[in-house]
Image (cartoon, helix red, strand yellow):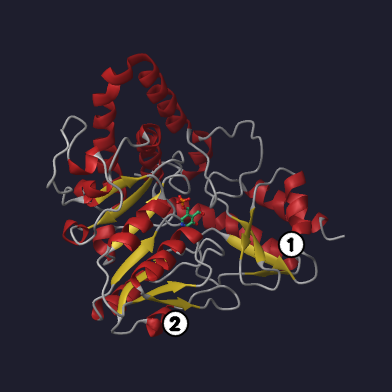
Amino acid sequence: MAKNIENFRKEFFLENPTHVPLNNAGLCLLPKTAAKKLEESTYMLARDGASGFSKIFEEWDLSKKVLGQFLGANPSEIAWTPNCSSALSFVADGYEPKDGEEVVIFENEYPANFYPWMARAKRYGSQLKIVKAEADLSRPTEKIIAAITPKTRIVALSHIQSDCGYLMDISAIAEAAHKVGAILVVDVIQSAGIYPIDFHKMNVDILCGGLHKWLCAPAGAGFLMMKVELAKKIQPNLHGALNYGTFEDAPSLGKTPYEDLRRFEQGTPSFHSICAAIPSLQLLEEYSVDNLWKKSHELRKVLLEGVLELGFDTYGGTQTGPHLSITHKKHPIKQFSDALMKEKISHALRPAPTAEGKVLRLSPFAYNTVDEMKHAVATLKGAIA
Ligand SMILES: Cc1ncc(COP(=O)(O)O)c(C=O)c1O
């Protein structure tokens, strides 16, 4: 049975908060257990040096098992990468191109899921089809499906859009992409940890993500997930000891990279982030992602009702993550951002195709409180002179 969600806050260093954490879509807090693990892995390296290496590699294997259980994949289908951008770049650079191919992406995707495809288009002559967002930044499934043609080779999108929290209906898009032989690449950095994900059940070809957002683990590692059969069709663009064998092996001409996802792990990884991800993922599991989603949405609702009364426009429609992006009908968004900063309420100003060219994004998580939401709303109200 899942732990009581009302105790989730106690797992974090929030007894004497330094700020109100409302930019969780940017960077989540680390649970106490993850901070402890970071400390332990630091001391282990400080004390044991190279003799601690084997322990670290055991943890590396364990971390893949734990991430695999959390996201519904086998360890052989997972590669740890330096970040989410590099995971996406491996696919964009290395998936075998076809003459006249089209790559379908969205307008105003987070740059990690935009530039790799732009670079592919330059390198291989692919045609980039950039699907426009609606005025409220929602991204209707029909629009992306309409952009898929027999020439489409790759469809790449974020499961939850970082500018407004819009949540995509992945299964319908996967079906349309597969019908024409295209692969669907999904960036789950804004959904993993807050929305239930099961790679094997999703019918998606590739998932890419990172640890430092809703997975509540340290920055410094991303992941790439796909079936081994597909991995064989992607040539790694980074090379080193580990994607060809071990640190102990002599280099040898003619050696080929591993066929499974280890082909994308070329060298010494970010041990600390990967080790500390283990307790973070276990904690999220203990509280259940369903309950984290529910609680975060209850908090979002308090914010939503408050900002609507104050004359704000909201973005992303009704199908969103806990993200709430806003602009004001009369006042510039900077006025509100300054007021929130004064109160040490973290938030983000994100670029977006709106009249002001940006939105103010608040992103509550299950460790926030209703009082914090009310404080944020009161601060926004106070900023309307
Ligand atoms: C959709 C999306 N992808 C990727 C990233 C981050 O990528 P990286 O970990 O490579 O910096 C973000 C960060 O905000 C994001 O929102």
Whether residue 158 is visible here, answered yes or no, is: no
Q: Where is residue 161 in the image (x, y as percent from the top left)?
A: 49, 64
The percent coordinates of residue 176 (x first, y second) are: 30, 79
- Mark 2 or mark 1, earlier in chain: 2
Residue appearing at x 31%, y 80% in the figure? 100
Write the residue at 29% across / 28% down.
Answer: 56
Q: Quadrant of residue 41?
A: top left
The local secondary structure at tag 2 comes to helix
Residue that mark 1 sits on: 333
Q: Is residue 205 visible?
A: yes
Q: Residue 143 carries which label?
A: 2
User: Which disc number belongs to residue 43?
Assistant: none
Question: Residue 304: x percent and y percent?
Answer: 64, 63
**Amino acid type of the residue that numbered disc 2 sits on in the rendered structure:** Lys
> As displayed, is residue 110 above or below residue 274?
below
| Relative depth, front residue between 151 and 70 | 151
Disc 1 residue type? Ile
Number of disc labels: 2
Q: What element carries label 1?
A: helix
Q: Residues within 10 Å of mark 1 (few under 14, many from 20)?
A: some
In this view, which residue lies farthest toward the left? 254
* Quadrant of the image containing the N terminus: top left
Please identify the residue farthest to the top as the structure is shown.
Answer: 47
